[in-house]
């Protein structure tokens, strides 16, 4: 018996908004909305769903959502260990494993973010206001392995992801002559794609390279427009078996292959680890994973018609282009300058929804949603006859990736 | 007390049993790296088992505090009250450490003058009588 291939059969999302703009609706209510829309898109009912999967220390635990949504039973509830957005594709991969092995039949992968209701990523709990009583600096007890690891970053003021991923990007510039303008072209390209996408938070805000170069420096080389949005919103994708996928509402998308993980000695990546091997430091850390993905699917970078690459920061997109073999190491700057990533005329149209830089930052699960739409012919920046789409989740942290195929 | 570079509101370090000896050495202004008791490979941050030979025997080797900038960023967002910007976060390659690096700051120089390859040396900042943080400043040569 050949292994059953899992398929993605439904996608859905809430409205996307700027950080803190969704204050009345709770984060888990938004998750429920996205899940219901994805299930409806598939032509399924909540009575068909028996599994839920998420990632990135999700606050909205599957056991509660299963009860809130009236699932007949929760047979599979899964959370991925990859930090932050690194677990998006991995959560889809775990859902696929569940349906392929009969642990569950219909698994919904979800992510909801209403950061304004909680804390802001990167603040490290530091207030901009002077404290009433000045603290006496002292060594604190770490309440987790992650915080013990952050103990070698936070006392130096390394709290923001923008600063952490500036470190490998600066090294890439030093080694290969990569420029801020090349990074800026990525932001400009993805913004142009967002201009056709009514869901995109920045859809009505054109961006030029001059705007990028004039934007405030955050943590150099990262300017404001090198950094992804901070958004409120939720999205979800429905995974089921090949057999169930055959007669549902929409054209199913096949999961051709998936990979997750990190290379030797990587730990959390450059955010806390200064001792990533030299050959890996100025990369996204995904090269080995990419090699396994090509090997197991028999595909190569030349087979990819459209890509949805995790874009928390422009530098991390640039390094992924090299990790996945779309160009040689050190040559991504020139590859970007060639216009390769543009919807119009590019050899590798990338982030056709606008990405986290211009559609919304939903920890990259919206890239999986767009990957499905791009193979269904539903993207607002459609790539004609696209058959294979690469989706990635994060870079410069342990990460994951999917190769999706049109049926 | 030493010269101060960052305000008291800077996030304090957090340690567990594995990393505590590193911070105790720092309180004595000793910059140390962990050294495997079996194969002598060095490692940072501290961890329970040697990733090379998997021995759980280890000791601590003091290093000179000399090094060079491996990569860096200038942060233009203040970290709360009293924080001057831009400030420099850098990865420092530590001399005599068996090829190790650490995250720290480069202080005592205009942020725009920091460059990869710049020679630096440790400067201890006593945040309080019980807490010292190693920063780095350019060497004179």
Image (cartoon, coloured by chain):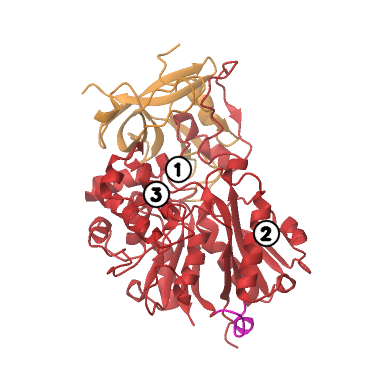
Q: Mark 1 lies on which chain?
A: A
Q: Mark 1 points at which residue?
A: A161
Q: Name the residue under label 3.
A: A313
Q: Which chain carries label 2?
A: A
Note whether residue A60 is visible. no
Residue in the picture at 47% in, 60% down: A198
Note whether residue A387 is visible. yes
Mark 3 Cα-neighbour bin, 10 Å: few <14, some 14–19, many ≥20: many
Nearer to us in this view, B62 or A124 = A124
Nearer to us in this view, A407 or B130 = A407
User: Residue A1 at x, y = what percent?
Assistant: 60, 88
Magenta segment boundaries in residue numbering:
A240-250
- For chain A, give the colour: red
Gap between marks 1 and 2, in whole Å? 29 Å
Q: Are marks 2 and 3 in contact (CB under 8 Å)?
A: no
User: Residue A138 at x, y = what percent?
Assistant: 57, 22
In the picture, measured across the screen, residue B74 lies left or right of residue A84, that is left
Residue in the picture at 48% in, 24% down: B26
Say above or below: B80 vs A290: above
Q: Which mark is residue A32?
A: 2
In the picture, measured across the screen, residue A132 lies left or right of residue A394, that is right
Q: Are the residues under marks 2 and 3 on the same chain?
A: yes
Name the element at disc 3: loop
Q: Which residue lies furthest to the front in this view?
A: A204
Say above or below: A119 vs A15: above
Q: Which of marks 1 and 2 is nearer the N terminus?
A: 2
User: Residue B70 at x, y = what percent?
Assistant: 31, 39
Q: Which chain carries label 3?
A: A
Q: Which residue lies furthest to the top in this view?
A: B1
């Amino acid at each position: 018996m050949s292994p059953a291939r899992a398929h993605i059969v439904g996608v859905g999302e809430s409205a996307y908004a700027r950080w803190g703009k969704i204050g009345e609706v709770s984060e888990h209510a938004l998750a429920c909305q996205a899940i219901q829309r994805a299930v409806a898109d598939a032509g399924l009912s909540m009575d068909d769903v028996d599994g839920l999967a998420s990632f990135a220390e999700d606050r909205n635990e599957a056991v509660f959502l299963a009860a809130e949504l009236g699932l007949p039973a929760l047979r599979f509830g899964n959370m991925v260990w990859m930090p932050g957005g690194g677990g998006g594709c991995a959560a889809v991969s775990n859902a696929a494993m569940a349906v392929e092995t009969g642990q569950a039949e219909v698994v919904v992968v979800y992510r909801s973010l209403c950061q304004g209701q909680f804390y802001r990523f990167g603040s490290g709990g530091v207030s901009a206001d002077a404290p009433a009583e000045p603290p006496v600096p002292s060594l604190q007890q770490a309440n987790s392995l992650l915080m013990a690891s952050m103990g070698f970053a936070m006392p130096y003021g390394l709290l923001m992801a923008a600063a952490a991923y500036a470190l490998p990007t600066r090294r890439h510039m030093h080694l290969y002559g990569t420029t801020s303008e090349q990074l800026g072209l990525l932001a400009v390209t993805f913004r142009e794609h967002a201009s056709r996408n009514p869901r995109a938070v920045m859809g009505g805000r054109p961006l030029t390279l001059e705007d990028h170069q004039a934007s405030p420096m955050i943590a150099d080389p990262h300017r404001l427009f090198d950094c992804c949005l901070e958004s409120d919103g939720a999205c979800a994708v429905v995974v089921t078996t090949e057999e169930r996928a055959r007669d549902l509402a929409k054209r199913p998308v096949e999961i051709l292959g998936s990979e997750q993980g990190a290379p030797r000695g990587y730990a959390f990546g450059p955010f806390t680890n200064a001792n990533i091997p030299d050959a890996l430091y100025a990369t996204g850390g995904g090269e080995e994973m990419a090699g396994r993905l090509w090997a197991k699917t028999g595909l190569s970078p030349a087979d990819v018609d459209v890509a949805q690459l995790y874009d928390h920061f422009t530098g991390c997109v640039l390094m992924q282009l090299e990790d996945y073999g779309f160009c040689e190491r050190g040559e991504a700057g020139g590859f970007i300058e060639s216009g390769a990533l543009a919807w119009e005329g590019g050899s590798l149209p990338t982030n056709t929804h606008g990405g986290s830089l211009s559609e919304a930052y939903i920890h990259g699960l919206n890239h999986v949603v767009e990957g499905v739409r791009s193979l269904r012919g539903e993207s607002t920046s459609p790539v004609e006859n696209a058959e294979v789409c690469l989706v990635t989740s994060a870079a410069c942290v342990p990460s994951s990736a999917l190769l999706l195929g049109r049926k | 007390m030493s010269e101060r570079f960052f305000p008291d509101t800077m996030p304090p370090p957090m340690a567990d049993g594995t990393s505590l000896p590193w911070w105790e050495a720092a309180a004595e202004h000793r910059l140390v790296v962990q050294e495997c008791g079996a194969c002598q490979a060095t490692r940072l941050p501290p961890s329970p088992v040697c990733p090379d030979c998997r021995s759980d025997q280890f000791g601590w080797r003091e290093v000179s505090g000399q090094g060079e900038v491996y990569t860096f960023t200038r942060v233009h967002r203040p970290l709360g009250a009293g924080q001057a910007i831009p400030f420099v976060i850098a990865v420092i390659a530590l001399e005599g450490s068996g090829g190790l690096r650490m995250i720290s700051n480069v202080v005592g120089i205009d942020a725009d003058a920091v460059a990869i390859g710049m020679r630096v040396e440790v400067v201890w900042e006593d945040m309080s009588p019980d807490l010292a943080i190693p920063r780095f400043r350019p060497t004179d040569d």
